[in-house]
Structures are given as C-alpha cells and as structure tokens.
C-alpha cells in the first residue's frame, strides 16, 4: 500500500488509523489499512452521490472490483482497488464479508431513519466486518469472529444518538463487545482497539491514552 493511501486514512478515518499504529508488522499494518480504505470508499458512495441511483452505481462499481479479483481478471487501476486485490490474494480472504459490506451501504441510500435494530445490523456489516477481516489478517488460523463485536460497537457509537432506546442499544453493544474481544489473541487486538474510542469526552490526547491502555490491557 502506498504512503498516499495511508495518509488518506489518517485524514478521513483517524480512529482506525490510530489503532493500526499498534500493529507491529508493517506489511500486515498496510494490509489492514487497505481494508479500512475499502470501507471508506463504500461509505463515501451514499454521501457523495446526488441521488440514490448514482449511489447504487458507485456501489456496483465496487462489486465489479470484487468480480475482477475473485475471477482472477485484471483489476481496474484505482489505489484502493489495487491494494484490496493484493490483500485478498495474499491472505485468501473470503468474498462474503466484503460483499456484505457493500450490501450494508445500500441502506444509507434510503432517507428513512434507521430503527435501532437496523442500525445494529448496519454496524455489524460495516465496522464489524471490517474489524473481522482485519483480525483474519493479523491472526491467521485464529477465530476472528469476536472482532466483529468490537467493530460493531465502534461503528454504532459513531452514529448520532437520537433517543433513550438508541443510547441503551449503544451501551449494550459496547458491553457485549468488551466481553467478546477478550477472546481474541493479542496480535489481533489492534483490529478492535478503536472501539475504546466509542465514548464521550474525546480529545486527541485522551484518544491516544485510551488506545494505549486498551492495547496494554487487551480490553476496550
């Protein structure tokens, strides 16, 4: 992965960029960043499109990228697409979670507010699956499933909290994730460390301290 892509994630996704700094292996760190870059590109589709049809076209573009990768065809020239293709091939990543991450973004093309259950499902299939894929890269051969809970808590915590029911859901999800991620091997923990930032009272210094203690303790 190029330094340009790393710089991009530092600007647009500072939480996960910070957590990735705790990955000691530079090659694996770059591979995890490619997953975050892919998630960022999918997240942009509903935001930059002027209507839902254009948003669908953007998401279809990324589905076609997956077709190219998994059918061993030439992958279009795009920094994130190229980086993602390399990571998939190097780590033999399954297509299903990458496809589900695309499907989850279609919900954002609908202007109707998400119900708490819809928001939870959305979080599981965006930040949750990205964390699970990152854990697959960091700790091959281990169960990456618990990482999904950590990524879910982070994604859900970043959404605007609109009512008491939503507040309770965020807190339940965070507590469940805290228990789940303890099952992860230490080398996979940076895949979920950013979930420690899904709390109030944030500042750059406080974020760094929270991440440091989360990684040291293996808890979010």
Image (tube, rainbow, N blue to C red):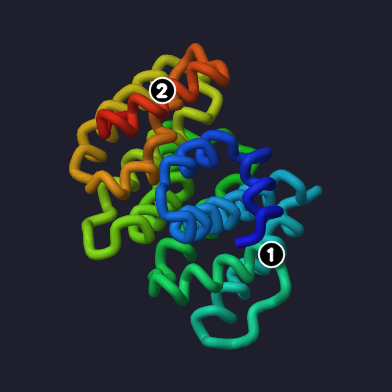
Residue found at the very far top of the displayed protein: 201
Q: Quadrant of the N terminus?
A: bottom right
Residue at which label 2 appears: 210
Question: CA gap, disc 1 to disc 2?
Answer: 31 Å
User: Which numbered marker is on residue 162?
Assistant: none
Residue occupying the point 26% across, 34% down? 218
Residue occupying the point 52% across, 57% down? 30
Q: Quadrant of residue 96?
A: bottom left
For label 2, the SS is helix
Q: Is residue 219 among the parts visible in the rendering?
A: yes
Count of number-bearing discs: 2
For label 1, the SS is helix
User: Residue 163: x, y in percent?
Assistant: 47, 17
Residue at which label 1 appears: 79
Quick one: label 2, few (<14), some, or many (20+) residues within 10 Å? Answer: some
For residue 78, side relative to residue 151 (left or right): right
Residue occupying the point 39% across, 74% down? 92
User: Residue 84: x, y in percent?
Assistant: 55, 66
Q: Nearer the viewer, residue 160 or 5?
A: 5
Q: Quadrant of residue 60?
A: bottom right
In the image, is residue 99 above or below residue 217?
Answer: below
Q: Is residue 173 among the parts visible in the rendering?
A: no
Q: Quadrant of residue 198?
A: top left
For residue 54, side relative to residue 167 (left or right): right
Q: Quadrant of the C terminus?
A: top left
In the image, is residue 59 above or below residue 166?
Answer: below
């Amino acid at each position: 992965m190029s330094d340009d892509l790393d710089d991009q994630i530092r600007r647009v996704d500072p939480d996960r960029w910070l957590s990735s700094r705790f990955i000691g292996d530079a090659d694996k760190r770059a591979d995890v960043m490619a997953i975050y870059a892919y998630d960022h590109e999918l997240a942009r589709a509903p935001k930059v499109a002027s209507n839902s049809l254009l948003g669908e076209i953007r998401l279809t573009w990324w589905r076609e990228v997956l077709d190219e990768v998994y059918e061993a065809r030439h992958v279009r020239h795009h920094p994130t697409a190229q980086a993602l293709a390399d990571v998939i091939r190097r780590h033999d990543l399954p297509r299903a979670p990458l496809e589900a991450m695309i499907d989850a973004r279609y919900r954002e093309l609908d202007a109707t507010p998400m119900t708490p259950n819809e928001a939870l499902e959305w979080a599981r299939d965006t930040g949750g699956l990205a964390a699970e894929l990152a854990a697959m890269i960091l700790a091959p051969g281990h169960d990456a499933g618990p990482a999904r809970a950590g990524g879910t808590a982070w994604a859900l915590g970043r959404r605007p909290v609109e009512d008491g029911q939503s507040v309770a859901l965020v807190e339940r999800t965070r507590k469940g994730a805290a228990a789940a991620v303890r099952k992860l091997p230490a080398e996979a923990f940076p895949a979920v460390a950013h979930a420690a930032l899904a709390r109030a009272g944030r500042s750059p210094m406080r974020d760094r301290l929270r991440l440091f203690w989360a990684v040291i303790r293996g808890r979010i």
